[in-house]
Structure formats: structure tokens, C-alpha cells
Image (spheres, helix red, strand yellow):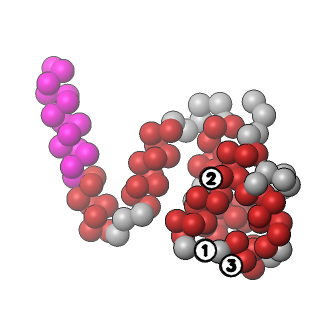
Amino acid sequence: MAIDYEALGQRIKDARKQKGYTQEQLASAVGMSQQHIGNIETAANKLSLQALVDIADVLGVTADALLYDSLPAAVSTYDIEAKQILDSCNDADKESLLHLMAEIRDAFNNKNA
């Protein structure tokens, strides 16, 4: 499966904005020009594996989360979305959400038993 550079660029842009970074701040953190980051986000330029890893590291996401539609069933969309939600929470909120998820899972299991 070929890499969808447009989708990859959009996910990088979304992760950058979620982190509150400008293109210039991300570029500085990974040692690139702001123009190159802009070109990656619009798929005008392809990025190297090292650039992908560096960007993912700075943004606090995994490279597979950025590439997920280019990886054959390596990670489900649900796993990625759940991780993004949890990553946006503080520790207390994470604990509450995990507790609720366990309760809902148990309720579904009891219903289907």
C-alpha cells in the first residue's frame, strides 16, 4: 500500500495544532524550515523516515498514528482515536475514562452473556 502523503500531512498538521505549535515552532524543534513543514503538511514534499520520526517525537505521537491508513491493519482506527482522546486528558481524567470504559465493557459482556 502506498503512503497517502496528503492524509499524512493533514494528520501532522492536526497533531501540531493540537499541541499548540505553529509551523515555525515545529520546524525549529525538528531542524527544518517553516516552508518545508508547510510543504509536508500540504503533500508538496515527501518526508524522510527520519523526519517522520522527529516530527512524531516532537508532537508526542507515534509514527504509526501518523501513518495508520498506510499500514495494512497494523493499528485500528479505534485504537488511534482512543489514544488521541486519552492523550488530550490529564491523569485524573484518564483514570475516570478508563474506569468508565471498563464499566461499559462489563455491561456489554453481561448483556451478551
Between 55 and 99, which is closer to the camera in this rendering? 55
Which image quadrant for residue 69?
top right
Residue 25: which numbered mark, if any?
A: 3
* Kind of element beneath mark 3: helix
Q: Characterize the local packing of mark 2: few (<14), some (14-19) or many (20 or more) Cα atoms within 10 angstroms.
A: some
Q: Which residues are magenta?
A: 99-113
**Dot 3 and dot 2 residues touching (CB under 8 Å):** no
Give amino acid for label 1: Tyr
* Residue of label 2: 11
| Residues tagged 1 and 3 counted as in contact (Cβ below 8 A) | yes
Disc 1 target residue = 21
Look at the image and tell me in which quarter the C terminus lies: top left
Amino acid at pointer 3: Gln
Q: Is residue 66 above or below residue 59?
A: above
Left of 98 or right of it: where is 36?
right
The x and y percentages for residue 30 are 75, 73
Q: Nearer the viewer, residue 1 or 18?
A: 18
Instruction: Name which residue lies at 72% across and 65% down.
Output: 54
